[in-house]
Amino acid sequence: MDTMKIFIREFPFTLSVGSMLSSQEHLFYYFRGFELKSNPDVSQVDQAVRQWFKKFNVYDEARRLEFLTLGRFDLFAALSFPEADAKHLETCLAFFFWAFSTDDLSDEGELMTKPDDVQAGHNISMKMLENPDDPAPKYPYAAMLHDLLQRIKATATPGTYVRFIRAFEAWSQSQVKQAHNRHKDRLPSVSEFILMRRATIGAAMVEAMVEYSLDIKIPDYVFQHPIMIAMSDATSDIMTWPNDLCSFNKEQADGDLQNLICCVMMERDIGLQEAIDVILQMIDDRVSDYIELKSCLPSFGAEVDAELAKYHKALEYFVQGTVVWYYKSPRYFRGLDVTDKEEAIIQLFPKSNNTLS
């Protein structure tokens, strides 16, 4: 059944995020057990990465300025990699430029409902991965990835490098699958969407970048431990579900219903505000899950435990910084300040020219 076609509920004109935004100690986007910190070196690397991005000619001047201004990726990098040195931070910021420009191809660009074209881009990048020592491909998104891989490989462990590549493969293929869902007007179940969303947000790539950012050295077998896998799933959900809350308004204006809010509304037959409240509770439950799992993590020996503690602290910084960035970035709220308010009533954006038919 084309479930999207029967999802005909009219959205209200406004939604409230008052339950998210009461005081700093209780703001929705400040999580129990997660700390927030900012990297002071971001200003010195931002201009260099902007020039790096410019040389790939992904956008014309006006579109590039809009992409960078609305994105505030400098803030994102500062909050997400607060302890990286300038060299590693530069690569992390370049990673954001590449990942978001690539993601926008299928999320809001001309390829939104063209899975074959998304697949073609995926194939170019995969061919590059099979021959990493060949010259960079002309396709700009694959060329950026080629450059990033050289940077990562220079200082990361072989395991980190392989984990990034495997994560990219899963992320890129998930973009193709999501394009198919849009093309077929298919809205997945909540459980199916959660699994797919962990891939489409690139959570495993993020984990590899966290390793790279501090040149953390953790044996490969540690990542296969069931508690490590469960903790990974939890942090993925904690940083992903708030993204669906924040990006919903922008996406509904584009006619894109591939969002957890829509899946919850559909599956539970409830309204928009009710679905938001359900997801808020889901997020809080996942924070509790993560804290409990972390307390049960076994010892892998003193040396590994020290690296693992550094990794989890950095990953927690990333998750907390990411969610704060969602609320502070114009990318999702178009200049509306929704931070540090007891209640924020958000007007739903009107339909855009990108609306899916």
Image (spheres, helix red, strand yellow):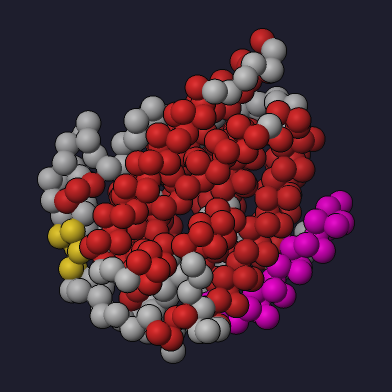
Relative to 343, is 288 on the left or the right? right
Residue found at the far front of this picture: 268
> Camera-side residue: 115 or 212?
115
Looking at the figure, which quarter contains the C terminus?
Answer: bottom left
Residue found at the far top of this picture: 302
Which of the 4 quarters of the picture holds residue 36?
Answer: top left
Relative to 19, residue 300 above or below: above
Instruction: Write the residue at 78% across / 62% down.
Output: 126
Relative to 164, is 309 on the left or the right? left
Relative to 284, is 222 on the left or the right? right
Question: Measured from the top left, where is residue 168 in percent x and y?
Answer: 68, 54
Instruction: Write the residue at 39% across / 30% down.
Output: 34
Instruction: Write the residue at 42% across / 75% down.
Output: 256
Magenta stretch encompasses residue 236: no
Instruction: Write the residue at 27% across / 42% down.
Output: 28
Relative to 310, residue 225 above or below: below
Q: Is residue 94 visible?
A: no
Question: Measured from the top left, where is residue 84 in percent x and y?
Answer: 54, 29
Q: Can residue 222 be seen in this view?
A: yes
Magenta residues?
A: 110-135
Magenta stretch encompasses residue 114: yes
Relative to 23, residue 268 above or below: below
Question: Measured from the top left, where is residue 327 in percent x and y?
Answer: 31, 50
Question: Measured from the top left, where is residue 192 in percent x and y?
Answer: 54, 62
